[in-house]
Image (tube, rainbow, N blue to C red):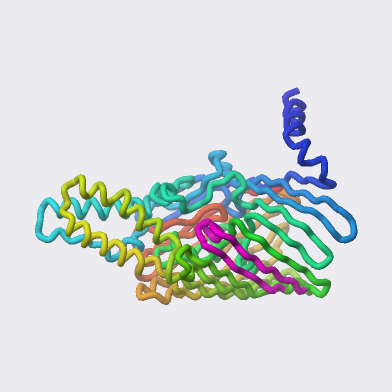
Amino acid sequence: MKMKLLAMALGTCFAMPTLAQTNVTLYGILDAGIQVSKLGKDTQTKMVSGIADGSRIGFKGTEDMGGGYKAIFNLEARVEVDTGSNKTGNLSDYQGYALTKGMNFPDFGSAALKGAAAQTLAGVRSALQPKYNVNATSPLILARGGGPDGGLFDRMAMVGLITPVGAVLAGRMYTPAYEVFNSADAFESGMAGSWGGITGGTGGLLTAGMAIRSNKSVQYRIELPNGFGGSLMYGFKNSGYIGLDKDFIAGNVRYKANGFDVGVGYNRGTNTDGSTGLVTTTVGGSYAFDDFKLFAGYQTMRNENSILLPVFFDAWDLEITPGLRAGGVPAPVIAAWTTIFRTNITKNFKLDANSYSLGAHYKLGNGRVMASYSVQDDRTLSNSDVTQYALGYNYNMSKRTDLYAVVGYTKNQNDGQYAPGAASASGGFTEFPGESGRVLQFGIRHRF
């Protein structure tokens, strides 16, 4: 009886939208597992949602209007199986320090200022890169409107028209360069071997190396019979990887035939002041033959003017400075500390890196062996390179359900604190800069 009532309620909720649709599909992925990590002196064991694939529920539909024309839509919401929420964070409990490097606020020989300087640095570190748990994120970023969007359908919200000469789409969508990036990732953007787990800035977080999705965007896509295809994307105000860009442009060219899925993609964001933001160029893909599938990718990442800098400047001016005044810190000292904060966070947020990844699948039994080797070559003065290794196995229990297990290892240098991550969340940080990270993950994934 309860199931009948639920079906009737859902039917009532979606009756009006579905009247005009020839096909509406409810779909999703539920993925959960256990992660055992050694990122410092302690071993941590956690339940994690979305290790192999981000858990989700979605609706997609088409209306065939004839003559090669179809209306389409796709709404996809994030679901964290461990908590039932739609917010995600990082897997590590440790703090990252790269963004506060150089922020040694001088006390000018005063005992009172010594205490205030130490408290200020601790507060900045906590706000910029706090100790994270899954489903937690920086209170400073959330207060200023940055970071994860947290919208109901933050994974996908799109409507479009397919025509005989291509498709025109509008909404929040995956970016063209990310599509190429994902096709070159042997771990398909999930588990501890995901290439995306190391393509960030010096600290391993916040200085994103890829705009995965873009808000407020229009896209033209075409797929030709010979396997070639491509896309062009333009994002309006408040587009880009965290919805703060003035505009966003991207495109790719791909070839998907004869076992190949390869391409080249380009993303570029423009900041609100007109300066160039994150620029990413990606080339690579995969080739399948017999029981093998080989993966290779190369990416360049540049960001001289992070879109997040105004967010943190405002936070200092509107939240930290009033507290310093109330604590009796003299105005000249506040001015000096402000200069130190702005100078160093600007320098630390710069991204200049090249990265590559190699990987393979091999069909074995009722599943596949997966392996990858990925490198992030940090070209900033920090030179915080990282190398990531991973080996895993998928076992297919049915067409819709599989079990997986993977081991991952990150070898950090200098200020690097990259920790192996998952599909739904960043790995976060190792306990100290330059320390290696080790992770064992196993879980179950069901598609419906």
Nearer to us in this view, 166 or 110: 166
- The foreground one among 370 and 124 is 124
Q: Is residue 380 above or below residue 422?
A: below
Does 187 lie within the magenta span?
Answer: no
- Indicate the position of residue 233 as horizontal and vertical percent values: 64, 66
Query: Residue 390's quadrant in the figure?
Result: bottom right
- Quadrant where the N terminus is found in the figure: top right
Q: Residue at x 86, y 53 (%)?
A: 64
- Outermost residue to the top: 1
Is residue 164 rendered to the left or right of residue 381?
Answer: right
Q: From where the camera sits, is residue 44 visible? A: no
Residue at x 72% of width, y 46% of height: 59
Q: Residue at x 51, y 67 (%)?
A: 270
Closer to the camera in the image, 66 or 230: 66
- Which residues, given as a range, are shown in magenta? 228-254
Q: Is residue 193 left or right of residue 76?
A: left
Residue 385's spot in the image, x, y percent? 42, 72
Query: Where 134 falls versus 266 (above or below)?
Result: above
Query: What is the x, y in percent for residue 132?
Result: 41, 49
Visible in this render: residue 361? yes
Spot occupied by residue 386 in the image (x, y as percentages of width and height): 44, 70
Q: Quadrant of residue 431?
A: bottom left
Circle count:
0
Is 333 displayed left or right of 39 in the figure? left
